Structure formats: C-alpha cells, structure tokens
Image: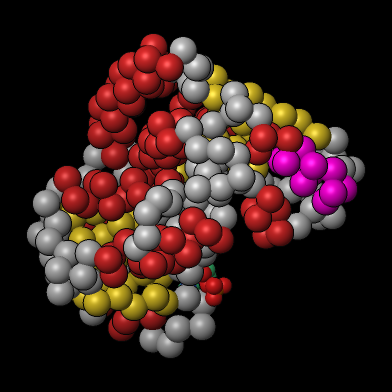
Amino acid sequence: MTAQLLNGRQRAKQLQSELSESFAEAAAASGVQPTLAALQVGEDSGAAGYLRAIRRACQGVGVTLRPIKLPEQSSQGEVQAALTELNSADDVHGIMVLEPLPDQVDGTRLVEFVSSAKDVDGVHPLNAGRLAAQREPHFVPATPAGAIRLLEEAGVDFKGKRAVVIGRSDIVGKPMALLLLHRHCTVTIAHSRTEDLPGVARQADILCVAVGRPEMVTGEWIKPGAVVVDFGTTYIGGSLKGDCEQASVEAVAGMLTPVPGGTGPMTNVMLMDNLLSAYRRKVPADGF
Ligand code: NAP
C-alpha cells in the first residue's frame, strides 16, 4: 500500500484566499481594520522567526500585525501589564505571546493574563476547558484544528475508530485527543512514560504523532491502512523532518500528512481563522 498524502500546503492556500475575502467583507462592513498583536520578550531568534511567519500569514489575509517587543530583562509584572493593555485595546482583536520567553517570565502563568476573547492560540484555561467540555464559544489551538480539517475534508471516518495520540502538550497532543474524542473515536494518549509504544501505536486506526523526535515512528509501528498525522517539525542539516520516517510509514499507512507540506502550512491559516472568529464576535475585552 502507498498512503494517500494529504496536501496541507495546497489546502492552506485555498483557505487563505477564502479568509482574505471574509476579512475584507467584515472590515468593509464594520470599518474596523482586523488586528493581531504579537508580544515578544527579548531577542530570541526562534521567536523572531515565528514572528516573520505570523507576519506573512497576516499579510496573506489582509490583517494588520502589531508587534510589541519588550526588553529581555522585563519582569513577569511588566509583561503582564503589557498584556492587560492589549486586552483593553478596542483595536486589537487577537493576542499571541511568542515563545520562547526569557527564564524570569513564566509562560504558563502568562496565558491567564491574555483575555480569553482574544486568545487566538487557544491556550487560556477557559478556552481549553470549554474545548474539553464542548461548550461554545472557544478557540481551538491552530495546529490540531488544521489537522482535523485535513482529515475531515479527506473523508476520514472517525466514529468508533481507535485513535492514538503520541504527545500530551497543551497546544497539540491534548487538544488533538479531545477533537478526536468529540468525533467519537476511542482515544489513547501516549507519552514519554508509555510502555510498549510501538505496540500501542499499532492498535491505531488513526495515529497522531506530536513529539519532536525526528523519524521516531517507522512503518513497523503502523497498522496497515491507518491514517497517520505527523505533527513533528525538526530541522536537521537545513531540511525539515517529521516524527515519522516517511518512506516506511507511507508504505503501510492509508493516509499520511507529510512533513513538510502537511499539518505545518495549515497552522498559520487556522490561526487566522481563529482571529476572524475573535474579530466577528467583537466581545468586550473582559472575556466571553
Ligand atoms: P512538547 O510540548 O515538547 O511535547 C512533546 C510530547 O512528546 C510530550 O508529551 C512528551 O511526553 C512526548 N514525548 C517526548 N519523548 C517521547 C518519547 N520518546 N516517546 C513518547 N512520547 C514522547 O512538544 P509540542 O509543542 O507538542 O510539539 C511536538 C512536535 O510538534 C514538535 O516537533 C513541534 O515542533 C511540532 N509542532 C508542529 C506544529 C505545526 O504547525 N505542525 C505546531 C506546534 C508544534 P511527556 O509529556 O511525558 O514529556
């Protein structure tokens, strides 16, 4: 078997043009320019690279990016104060905090200071809780949202299927597991302490891998015909590698999101989709 590759790059392009039209229509009707604020603390090159990617995503859909840069030595209180200001700014519709942050700033505590109504990353506990409880409104983190969209549009049948998600981060693994559960999969979440990981993975009709260990999953881990979602992104010698060894996995799986070109390109357009929801809701800054 050779897996069908799910082309996230192509789908992201189409979505980008749909979003671009939606933003233009909404902005023309309201007279308010959609704006995303991105807060960076210090000079980290990873955060700066991410900011460039976000800028391209914003430009692609006609959104204004407002970058806010605080000095490397900023205290937790100073970063929180900057967020509080953005929360109450009527002309800011979404807020994201770029990571990594300097050591003195606790990112986990920081997410609680972003208004849940502007939390387009979907990391505020209120959004995470509402996703878990299937209560609207909430924002779904962009990476798993993009993956589910690719699977749904490829006609994947979720009901009653065994899904295994390897990785339990708040931005990828856990929300992906919830999205699968809500579609009636029987879900197992695996992680670094899971015993017999290849054996657990082999039970999966739908296997999602969000670990960050390049080519960890090989064809022997895959149930023949399974749907495989590879979230991994690691640069090795200038080329991007996923968590799956593509050649051997592709030979056994029924569908695969490749790296590059699978879930990655979908992420930033889904972020813009979240921003469109935030913009349309135009809720007050103190929450839903
Ligand atoms: P993370 O926060 O570091 O979480 C990694 C998870 O993998 C943890 O739950 C960890 O388990 C688990 N893990 C680590 N080593 C393992 C092992 N040997 N066996 C089984 N599980 C293991 O990472 P993340 O933010 O979720 O990102 C995961 C990957 O997705 C990275 O490559 C990242 O670059 C990529 N990513 C891609 C996108 C995209 O747009 N496609 C977006 C975000 C992230 P414990 O919890 O037990 O430590």
Question: Between 238 and 155, which is closer to the camera in this rendering?
Answer: 155
Q: Is residue 220 above or below residue 262?
A: below
Q: Is residue 209 left or right of residue 118?
A: left
Q: Which residue of the protein is positioned furthest toward the bottom in this rendering?
A: 195
* Residue depicted at x 54% and y 24%: 35
Q: Is residue 27 left or right of residue 16?
A: right
- Is residue 228 one of those drawn in magenta? no
Residue 121 makes an appearance in the image: no
Question: Between 259 and 145, which is closer to the camera in this rendering?
Answer: 145
**Percent x, y of residue 68:** 72, 29
* Residue depicted at x 30% and y 75%: 187
Q: Is residue 219 left or right of residue 165?
A: left
- Give the color scheme: rainbow, by chain, secondary structure or one colour: secondary structure
* Residue depicted at x 84% and y 49%: 77
Question: Between 41 and 231, which is closer to the camera in this rendering?
Answer: 41
Q: Quadrant of the N terminus?
A: bottom left
Q: Secondary structure of the magenta portion, mostly?
A: helix
* Residue depicted at x 85% and y 35%: 71
Q: Is residue 137 above or below residue 134?
A: above
**Percent x, y of residue 188:** 34, 78
Q: Is residue 118 above or below residue 3?
A: above
**Percent x, y of residue 284:** 56, 38
Q: Is residue 192 above or below residue 104?
A: below
Residue 53 makes an appearance in the image: yes
Count of numbered badges drawn on the protein: 0
**Percent x, y of residue 221:** 29, 73
Magenta stretch: give its range. Answer: 75-84
Q: Is residue 12 left or right of residue 125?
A: left
